Amino acid sequence: MQTATLSPIPLLQRSLQLLNPIYTPLLILASPSFFIPIIGELVPIVGGLLNLAYVVVGAPILGGAALVLVDQHLKQQSPVLGNSLDQAISKAVPLVLGSVLLLLIVFGGSLLLVIPGIYLGVRLAFLICAIALEGQGATEGLGYSWNLVKGRWWGVFWAFLALGLIFGIPILILSLIVGGIAAALNFGLLVAVVVGAVTTAIVPILNIFTVLLFRSLQDMQGQAA
């Protein structure tokens, strides 16, 4: 049983401790984010269509399956890729609809000088968790996440920001280095392959971190009730 916390370092340490047994199935679920940009480099029109389909439909369902798989592991159940996918597919409509609503809300907020978009993004960050793990509908999931983060916005913001900095800065540096090499070799595909591989490789850690943060918020909410 994990101790409820919003501190990013303990959450990241716990994520790494849980990673090994479920890394491969989580990586499989994240793999389209590696292959689609490569296809986009080779065949831009096809890649663009695939990327749109993935963002709107694929990512919410596969992301939901990843969260289910992590949660099964946390509950010391035997996480099975097929079972996790089945559960996510059974919730495909609310997952896709909720994801579209989230994108529209955050995008609309971002038009208002960015800050409202960041605020809304954090308050609604656990929409997919609410749908995939708690059986909420699309609109209900928005309210669930909103209430879950209430009073703890700064803690959640810092947790995600710290995680983004820990992984984002090295990836940015890698992108600049690989981009320079690719430009010198006139081989643009190199960036998609190398940076895509590294980015996809850390997605399982982000999945685990998100579920741990979600469950910590639930525990804190229960303690405060």
Image (cartoon, helix red, strand yellow):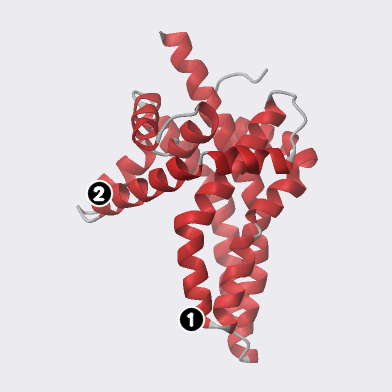
Q: Residues within 10 Å of mark 2 (few under 14, many from 20)?
A: some
Assign the N terminus to one quadrant of the image: top right
Closer to the chain start, of discs 2 and 1, is: 1
Residue under the image location 70 percent in, 52 percent down? 27
Residues at marks 2 and 1, CA–CA distance in whole angstroms = 30 Å
Residue under the image location 48 percent in, 41 percent down? 160
Residue under the image location 47 percent in, 74 percent down? 48
Q: Is residue 177 visible?
A: no
Q: Foreground: 92 or 130?
A: 92
Assign the C terminus to one quadrant of the image: top left
Amino acid at dot 2: Gly
Amino acid at dot 1: Ile
- Name the residue at the left extreme: 112
Mark 1 secondary-structure assignment: helix
| Residue corresponding to mark 1 | 45
Q: Quadrant of residue 192?
A: bottom right
Mark 2 secondary-structure assignment: helix
Q: Quadrant of residue 66?
A: top right
Q: Is residue 192 visible?
A: yes
> Could you tell me residue 214's position as x and y percent?
51, 29
| Residue corresponding to mark 2 | 109
> Could you tell me residue 204's position as x and y percent?
66, 46
